[in-house]
Each structure stands twice: as C-alpha cells, then as structure tokens.
Image: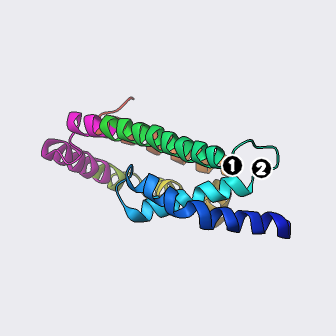
Amino acid sequence: MAAEAADDLERLSRKFRPALVAFFSRRVSSHAEAEDMTQEVFIRLAQTETENLDSTEAFIFRIATNLLRDRSRRDRVRDAYRQSVEQEDTEVDPLDPHRVAAARETIGKLWAAIQALPEPTQQIFILYRVENMDKQTIADNFGYNVRTVEKHISRALVFLARRVGGRP
C-alpha cells in the first residue's frame, strides 16, 4: 500500500471509526463484535480502489451494511445446521442401553470365536486385522508365502462370520 493511500485510510479511520462502531453496536450483540466488524470494513476499504468514488462515506456504510447481511446469512445457515443436528440427535440415542448391551454381546461372541480359531490362523488373523501388519511381513515371519497368509485370513473370516451369525 502506498504511503498516500495509508494516510487516506488513517484519515478515514479517524473520521468514521466512531460512527461505524456505533452503527454496528446497535445491530450486534457485543462491543467486541462491533469493533471486529469495523476493522473488517477498513480491511475491505484498503483492498478497494477508492479514487473513482462519488461518496466515500456512502461506500463505507455500504460495506458495513453488506457485512451485516453476510453475518445474518451466515447465522441463518449455522442455525439451520444446528437445528438439523439436534433433530438427528433426538431420533437416535447413541448411548441407548440396549444398543450398548447388544454391542458388548457381539464383541464377546467375536472374541470367543477368535479364541476358537486354530493357532496359526488365529495369530495371522490378529496380526493382519488387529495389528494392521501387512501380508508380506506376516508371511516372512511365519515362513509362509503371501498366498498362504491370504488363505488363513480368508478361512478366519468365514469361520468368524459363521460363529458370530453373519454371512456364511
């Protein structure tokens, strides 16, 4: 920003800041928010070419009015989102005791089924699905090829699905 433009902006700030703060204070909930919006007016003013304006005062208050409209739109969107989230929350209770009990029962069945797997299949399945180890590393550790590890994982999944009550 050129020195002349900075001087003009400083002059406009001294002249219009009190009026803008008062303008915003009548329309928003806090003085701090009014100050922030006043600062935003001057930021937008600094980013605009003002040499060809007929009335700088009208332009400044047009920016202020547009800021209020933007704020109002943003608040409406946030309120609508908040209401939609609240409606979703009332439909499903995430801590429903029946759902928690059912989930615990399913986890218990799953763990019992994992314990019933044959030893190498159980170890390979736990390393792959729980420890997130890649198949090649598992194969290297057990002295198998990758295809054998894949067969163990596949057998484990079929066995667990049948035991827990999923698809065969």
Front position in the image: 45 or 157: 45
Q: Residue, x 34% and y 32% (percent of image)?
A: 166
Q: Within 10 angstroms of label 1, few (less than 14), some, or many (20 or more) residues?
A: some
Whole-number angstrom distance, CA of label 1 to CA of label 2: 7 Å
Is 58 situated left or right of 2 in this image?
Answer: left
Residue position marked by numbered label 2 in the rendering:
50
Q: Earlier in the sequence, mark 1 or mark 2?
A: 2
Q: Tag on residue 56?
A: 1
Location of residue 138 (image quadrant): bottom right
Magenta residue span: 85-111
The quadrant in which the C terminus is found is top left
Q: Is residue 165 above or below residue 160?
A: above
Q: Marks 2 and 1: in contact by CB < 8 Å? A: yes
Q: Tag on residue 85?
A: none
Element class at badge 2:
loop
Residue found at the far top of this picture: 167
